[in-house]
């Protein structure tokens, strides 16, 4: 019987052929051989499936069945994955060189962790770096509900058994299924660890969800539901004041990220907290 891989990588793809090859290449170029790569495409019509097929068996498994949105596609791949750890990447995003090896070093030191995460870069349709995005130093349900415990999805690695234990991704969430998963892991008492490195690139362009803003209203509804899940039922003015206070305190205490913001200095992948 073939030995299970250490990392399962999932890419969900739907009509983003312009960026798909760069995404796949960034995964396959990692200096980490012990992985499987699963690509999910529920019905692209822009040539994406031809791009996927061109990689042959370099992609471990391709799932082409229709699904009920990104979270459902991720769950289909999750049920098929054999790895101990999970990394998932949208088809218009990119993982930076050496990310997998760097993340696994943290699990060698702390096998009890459920999530290892870092920072990321925001890029445009021409691969130009627009800015750096910093993940929060700590993750708790209350901090997430306040909006100050943001984790860059393209910079997050998860332990598969922990993800499955909380039920995977919520398929009814169409805007922040990744954030809800982090929240549910935190609510279940799982441990998080941030590394002060850049792991991945998040692409924003006019046609992307974040770039177009077309799901902003739905996002606010999802965030209100998650605040209720945590039990944060404060009036908006009081909640926003509490958010600003804690956000300011975190900025002061998280000196490495604050220094990076002020100097706009890159965070080398080789350096960690």
Image (tube, helix red, strand yellow):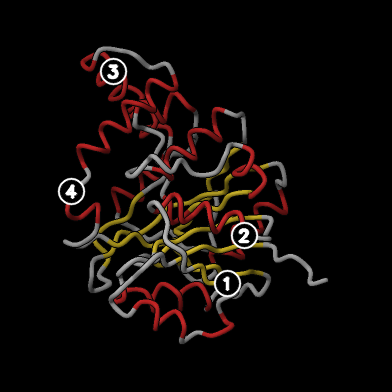
Question: Does residue 40 appear anywhere in the picture?
Answer: yes
- Mark positioned earlier in the residue sequence (3 or 1): 1
2 vs 3, front mark: 2
Location of mark 4 (residue): 214
Disc 3 and disc 4: Cα gap in Å? 25 Å
- Mark positioned earlier in the residue sequence (3 or 4): 4
- Mark positioned earlier in the residue sequence (2 or 4): 2
| Residues tagged 1 and 2 counted as in contact (Cβ below 8 A) | yes
Disc 2 and disc 3: Cα gap in Å? 41 Å
Location of mark 2 (residue): 80
Which of the numbered marks, if any, corresponds to residue 260? Answer: none
The quarter of the image holding the N terminus is: bottom right
| Residues tagged 3 and 1 counted as in contact (Cβ below 8 A) | no
2 vs 4, front mark: 2
Farthest residue, direction front:
66
**Element marked by disc 4:** loop
Q: Measured from the top left, where is residue 222 in percent x and y?
A: 32, 33
């Amino acid at each position: 019987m073939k030995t299970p891989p250490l990392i399962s990588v999932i890419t969900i793809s739907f009509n983003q052929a312009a960026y798909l090859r760069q995404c796949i290449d960034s995964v396959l170029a990692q200096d980490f051989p012990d992985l499987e790569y699963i690509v999910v495409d529920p019905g692209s019509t822009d040539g994406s499936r031809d791009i996927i097929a061109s990689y042959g068996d370099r992609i471990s498994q391709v799932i082409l069945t229709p699904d009920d949105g990104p979270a459902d596609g991720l769950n289909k791949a999750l049920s098929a994955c054999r790895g101990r750890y999970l990394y998932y990447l949208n088809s218009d995003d990119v993982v930076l060189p050496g990310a997998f090896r760097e993340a696994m070093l943290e699990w060698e030191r702390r096998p009890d962790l459920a999530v290892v995460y870092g920072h990321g870069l925001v890029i445009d349709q021409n691969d130009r770096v627009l800015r750096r995005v910093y993940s929060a130093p700590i993750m708790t349900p209350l901090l997430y509900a306040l909006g100050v415990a943001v984790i860059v999805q393209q910079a997050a690695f998860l332990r598969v058994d922990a993800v499955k234990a909380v039920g995977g991704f919520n398929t009814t969430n169409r805007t922040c299924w990744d954030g809800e998963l982090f929240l549910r892991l935190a609510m279940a008492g799982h441990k998080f660890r941030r590394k002060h490195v850049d792991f991945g690139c998040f692409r924003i362009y006019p046609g992307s969800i974040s770039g177009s803003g077309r799901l902003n209203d739905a996002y606010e509804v999802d965030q209100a539901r998650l605040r209720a899940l945590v039990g944060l039922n404060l009036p908006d003015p009081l909640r926003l004041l509490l958010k600003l206070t804690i956000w300011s305190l975190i900025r002061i205490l998280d000196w490495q990220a604050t220094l990076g913001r002020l100097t706009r200095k890159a965070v080398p992948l080789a350096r960690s907290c």
